[in-house]
Image (cartoon, rainbow, N blue to C red):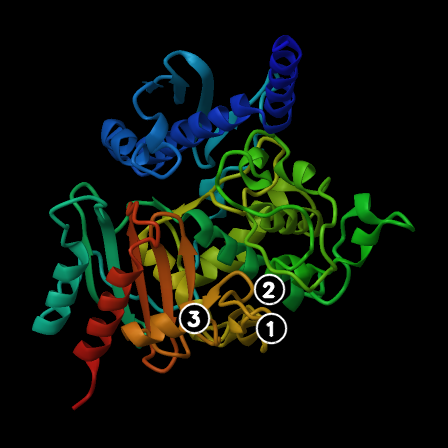
Amino acid sequence: MLWPAVILAIAGLGAAALHYRPDQAIRVATNVVAHNICDKAFVSGLDPQTAFAEITERDGIRRLRWPLRFGIDRSSGIVTASMAGLFASRAAFRDGFGCVMLLGAQDPYLLKVDVASLKGKEPPLLPEIAGPDIVTPSDAKLKAALDHAFEEPAEPPFRRTKAVVVVRDGAVIAERYAESVGVHTALPGFSMTKSVVNALIGVLTQQGLVTPSLPAAIPEWRGAIDPRREIEIEHLMRMISGLELDETNSGFDASSRMYLYDDMAGYALQAKLIAPIGTRWAYSSPTTQLLARIIRDAAGGPEQTLRLAWRELFNPLGMRDVTLEFDGSGTLQGSSFMLASARDWARFGLLYLNDGLVGGKRLLHEDWVDLSAAATLDTDYGAGFWTNRSEHPHAKARVAMGIPRDVFFASGDLGQRIVILPTQRMVIVRLGDSVDPTGDISGLGRLVKEAIEAVKEP
């Protein structure tokens, strides 16, 4: 009889559905759409319909595009996204704090601080990098480099460059912006936020509040027989914790599922070890979110985390057009959600170009930048940054493109990049919405190569 086989097949499919939870994977997609439109509309001030069109070209979401819908209520600051009315997700804008997902019956934690009051009234330690007007390059080679960075192919995938800023010797020498984007437009950095987490850990290290070589201060791992008690902060920074937190962006992986929880770090800290600590590298946003919780606890809470970021990082660097977002539990959303103007991202890059020194004050420990740029195991990832200081094939390919060997860079989804070029005394920022799987790395390579050629001394 076929019936037993059919019953077993149905039971197997049911068990698989319970394990993989396709409903959760779909909700991950609607979360991404709602949150991204919320940020683009309310923080960046861009057209939500254009944002929706660009977001739904991303891998994973593109396959679900036809039933996707969104709505925006500007009076309440809420964006809703759904699959033809099902699996609805909502993101809410909070002035000064960006957007946060509304995931359950309980309202997300709202920080009790006036962000405007945190912005420094004193001159920053970093000298001003440009005046109020867009710096249009007079050099023909630099102008051509920017023209090429904004060129679009005849066929998809489109590059959708939003901003490029080139800084040399501490001053902007060239910049260009897409329509509706300007020098004060805060744009999402996505995983470039991980590099900001690196900086905050570095600040706390300089202040003696954390030590990367000591076990991570996570009380839930303190059990006498819990092997995770040996995981160090640097293991988390380098993504070699051995935890089952690999990121595949499938909607079914731990990194994707993390975004369905108000307490994202609380979800991540439940992961089990699947490899010996320090021996296996796997890219992982939840790993960085654990660092965000460590920052919160070391700083003394959510409000103190925000104050720390402005007092010790943004204000000294003269960063003003910044929105730092928090999850529903009040922990910095350190894996993906900081927005800043292209110039502010460049100012952040100058902190690392200048070896952690700003205006004579050391914000980062004297060996912090080298630690951050040093390759992890046999990869081209450092600690919060990607690096060319590696024998990995990807690093060698970038060098072959014209991106120098000593370069390291912050990198985020859709081609967000802060490229730090020590030998050339340059920082190059590229922001955009490229759905090319590489984040338009070839376009970045051309931009960097042409910018270096343009400033080369005769």
The residue pinned by badge 2 equals 202
Q: Position of residue 457 (x, y in %)?
A: 20, 88
C-alpha separation, residue under disc 2 versus residue under disc 1: 7 Å
The residue pinned by badge 3 equals 393
Residue at 29% across, 45% down: 433
Q: Is mark 1 on a helix, strand or loop?
A: loop
Q: What element carries label 3?
A: helix
Residue type at mark 2: give it. Gly
Residue type at mark 3: give it. Pro
- Residue 381, label in figure: none
Residue type at mark 1: give it. His
Crowding at mark 1 (Cα within 10 Å: few <14, some 14-19, many 20+): some
> Which of the marked residues, 1 or 3, is nearer the chain's N terminus?
1
Query: In the displayed structure, does residue 292 sit left or right of residue 190?
Result: right
Which quadrant does the C terminus fall into? bottom left
Pointer 3 with pointer 2, Cβ within 8 A: no
Q: Which of 52 and 73 is in front in this view?
A: 52
Q: Where is residue 169 in the image (x, y as percent from the top left)?
A: 31, 77
- Residue 365, label in figure: 1
Q: Nearer the viewer, residue 359 or 1?
A: 1
> Which of the marked residues, 2 or 1, is nearer the chain's N terminus?
2
